[in-house]
Amino acid sequence: MRAAALYTAAGAMLLSTLSLAPAGTAGAAPGADERHGTTVAVARAKAAGIDFGRCPKNQGLPAHVRCGTVSVPLDYARPDGKQIRLLVSRARATHKDPHNSKRRVPGQGALVYNPGGPGASGLHFPLIGVIPAWKRLAAAYDLVGYAPRGVGPSAPLSCQDPKQYFKGPSMAPTYPSEAYKKERIAHAKAYARGCAERAGSALRHYNSLNNARDLDVLRAALGQSKLTFMGASYGTYFGALYAHLFPQHVRRMVFDSAVNPDPKQIWYHNNLAQSAAFEGRWTDFREWVAEHDDVYGLGITADEVLRNYEKARARLATKPAGGKIGPGQLQEAFLQAGYYDDHWPSRARALAAYLKGDSKPLVELAAPVTEAAAEEENTNAVYTAVECNDAPWPTDWAVWDRDNTRLARVAPFETWDNAWMNLPCAYWQAPRQKPVDVRTGPGELPPTLILAAERDAATPYEGALEMHRRLAGSVLVTERDAGTHGIAYGPNACVNGHVDAYLLEGRLPERRSACEGHPEPKPERATERKVKKPTPHQRDRHEPAARP
């Protein structure tokens, strides 16, 4: 699968030529008012604690998972002003050694988890303790998840009527016309306006710095003098902000699939880098399909598979499958294959079946779940607000058009879809922040663990290297020649062993260590299992579902 590396390298070279235009007003770095407000909020939370009880029925959590709320200031510069409540879930440590039923495992406090996004909820995280790979952690730690500010039950943010969120079928052209670009510009302006109108003056307070401050308040409310935290994808970014702001409060931290924290990359250039990396992973997938032409019949080379994919796009543009699936829905379904290689068999089977006249597997795979519209709209609103608020963005459409047109020449698969996803930031109506220059000096921060797959497209590997450089004393574990997004407690026993050793015993490997990649998935014939759709919690674009 070396051909894919050529695409990634080409994208990386191109990115070096892309420039960031002036982006209007940028806020100052966090100041004394926010620091004081955080101290006040932490003291209150420590005194109040969290009154855990039954979880809200609409969360669908079993009885052993308990829920409570913690109050945080909407604006940390005004700690006595409006408060918002974050919903928190917890499963107590079992203290049961999964390998020795007679041994009682001593507790190590709370392990707080964030799955990324921005906009993803961690409320279901405590359920992970029943999975074999997690049982040792579940024995030693209280597993704690929460819905960050703006997400779900935690002062939910909305930018449009959820009934209007899923629109399909949609086109999503790889090389958009000028008319289509104008349509998407209008959509982005309307979306940005909707965020401002629905959230009002509160909109500016949904950002990564406040997510980091909220995490310290949660730590105090849980009664923890120091934080043990695992963040995935976007969770690594505000986790790094936490390490920068509160290094003295850190016990252990795992950064799984690290975002590049360089202030110059947040967020416009990170998204361009992501689009370049997805081209390589898209090629990996097509090469895998070609290796299994005897199963799927989609071609014996990556180019032949691509031609069949484009054939399906053209056919869906003329006649949507099931009246619901157009090129946009097809692209969104296959984008998931760039995140998780265990999705490769279902995508290949659905494409093969569709081209042979059976659209049912594709419809089952790609059709919007209308029942999830409110949740998806909320997730997308938080994603947009956080990324738009966090940093300056180009406000001149000509910059977006130039940069994405150039990038699409070598990385067409995700480039324009990603641009449309983020374009509301060009027309954002809330003040922007100046990104923090995340870094810690020797001895300031306890050793931390960074995990990265070498070919991860959602958070390209350079981000893990940059995080490693910036967090003194950190250790980087690389899964070689693999590209799954989020590798802790996945199929790689080597990676899992390093995480166990660190979280359970405080042991770390050498400053940089590597694990051989996990095996690629085995092909599945149409009769082997039903098509599996990703749940909203599997998405992380940083990772929301693409808007139509």
Image (cartoon, rainbow, N blue to C red):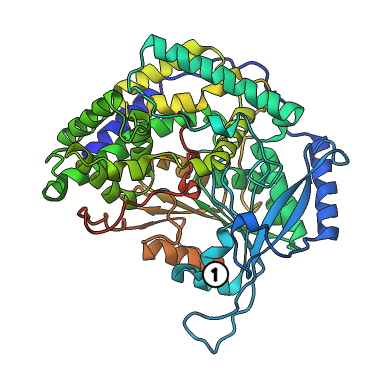
- At label 1, the amino acid type is Leu
Q: How many marks?
A: 1
Quickly name the residue at label 1.
137
User: Where residue 410 appears, x then y in whole percent?
Assistant: 30, 25
Quarter of the picture containing the C terminus is top left
- Please name the residue shown 67% across and 28% down the image: 433
Quarter of the picture containing the N terminus is top left
Looking at the image, the residue that sits furthest to the bottom is: 102
Relative vertical location of residue 84 with respect to residue 492 in this rendering, above or below: above
User: Where residue 337 appears, x then y in whole percent?
Assistant: 34, 44
Q: Kindly indicate the quadrant of the structure image that contains residue 173.
A: top left
Looking at the image, the residue that sits furthest to the right is: 80
For this view, does 360 lie left or right of residue 146? Answer: left
Q: Which residue occupies the foreground of this view, 410 or 128? A: 128
Relative vertical location of residue 466 with respect to residue 230 in this rendering, above or below: above
Q: Is residue 506 visible?
A: no
User: Where residue 534 appears, x then y in whole percent?
Assistant: 42, 48
- Please name the residue shown 37% across and 33% down the image: 324
Q: Secondary structure at mark 1?
A: helix
Q: Is residue 295 visible?
A: yes
Q: Kindly indicate the quadrant of the structure image that contains residue 348.
A: top left
- The residue carrying pointer 1 sits among few (fewer than 14), some (14 to 19) or many (20 or more) residues within 10 Å by Cα, namely many
Q: Which residue occupies the foreground of this view, 535 or 503? A: 535
Q: Which residue occupies the foreground of this view, 263 or 496? A: 496
Q: Which residue occupies the foreground of this view, 249 or 293? A: 293
For this view, does 481 lie left or right of residue 32? Answer: left
Relative vertical location of residue 64 with respect to residue 211 in this rendering, above or below: below
- Please name the residue shown 27% across and 23% down the image: 318
Looking at the image, the residue that sits furthest to the front is: 323
